[in-house]
Amino acid sequence: MSNGDERHLGRFGATALGVGAIVGGGILALAGVAFATAGTAAIVAFALNGGIAFLTAVSFVRLASRYPESGGTYAYAKRVVSIEVAFIVGWVVWFASIVAGVLYSLGFAVFAVEGAIRLFPALAEQWSWVGDGRGELLLALAAIGVYSWFLVRRSAGGGNAATIGKVVVFGLLVAGGLWVWLSGSPAEAVEHLRPFAPGGLLGVVQAMGYTFIALQGFDLIAAVGGEVKDPQRTVPFAMYAALGITLVIYLP
């Protein structure tokens, strides 16, 4: 268990850590897929995923309160089951993190290249590799490199600043969307919701599967449990608050 001097994360810091880990590439890369699959009912998919995430958070909260140390799922598996199982869990979590990183970097690259080609069509005409997949691959690798450099070089507090920046950007997007939606008549606003569920229940379930990763990340709070002040109280507050803030951002 960590010493008291090592516990420097309070409620704000732990919550910001969770929000920063959840909000990001997942919603940007997969929201379009969800709405294409389920229509406006994708909102229901996000809400249901939020309920599942809260149930998952309850398990993490209980484990984090029982074992207030760093390590997250690896530490819990080691404590409750065995070191062999913990070893496997650690590798699974590591692999899942790599897959998520690939998804986010490729999502960024695809959107960036597509936007650049639409703004500057001459790019694809002059350099064919820009639009044939190689451009996305190079940009994805560059994005991973720059972000990794930022993580290594950032000073204390940089993580909170990045989290606040992401929340502000999403807040502006939500405000702009609501303004456009509500600027017309109520009948037009309702019409924007139709067809509500063109894919039926199956479409909603598929959208849930596509987008649940967009609510992952709150477990990072438990992973740094050894750095959290008063973990029995701070970790539950931070996890639930991070999920709540994220759903407020996602659902509108």
Image (spheres, grey):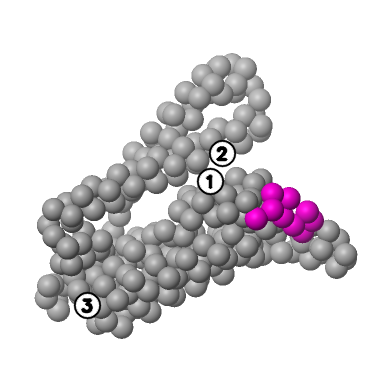
Q: CA distance from mark 1 to mark 3?
A: 36 Å
Q: How many numbered dots are placed on residues in this image?
A: 3
- Region rendered in magenta: 193-201
Which residue: 20% across, 74% down?
68
Q: Pointers 2 and 1 in contact (CB under 8 A)?
A: yes
Judged from the image, the secondary structure of the residue bearing numbered disc 3 is: helix
| Image quadrant in which the N terminus is located | bottom left
Label 3: how many residues lie within 10 Å, few (<14), some (14-19) or many (20+)?
Answer: few
- Disc sitting over residue 66 in the figure: 3
Q: Which residue is mark 2?
A: 111
Q: Inspect the magenta stretch and tell me whether residue 181 lies in it.
A: no
Residue 119 position (above or below residue 14):
above
Q: Amino acid at mark 1?
A: Ala
Query: Mark 3 or mark 2, which is nearer the start of the sequence?
Result: 3
Query: Mark 1 or mark 2, which is nearer the start of the sequence?
Result: 1
Q: Residue 234 at x, y = what percent?
A: 31, 79
Q: Amino acid at mark 2?
A: Phe
Closer to us: mark 1 or mark 3? 3
Judged from the image, the secondary structure of the residue bearing numbered disc 1 is: helix
Q: Pointers 2 and 3 in contact (CB under 8 A)?
A: no
Is 23 left or right of 82, judged from the image as shown?
Answer: right
Depth check: give the residue in front, 28 or 59. Answer: 59
Which residue: 47% across, 66% down?
52
Query: Which of the 4 image quarters holds residue 12?
Result: bottom left
- Disc sitting over residue 138 in the figure: none
Q: CA distance from mark 2 to mark 3?
A: 43 Å
Q: CA distance from mark 2 to mark 1?
A: 8 Å
Is 37 left or right of 81, judged from the image as shown?
Answer: right
Judged from the image, the secondary structure of the residue bearing numbered disc 2 is: helix
**Residue 149 visible, this angle:** no
- Disc sitting over residue 29 in the figure: 1
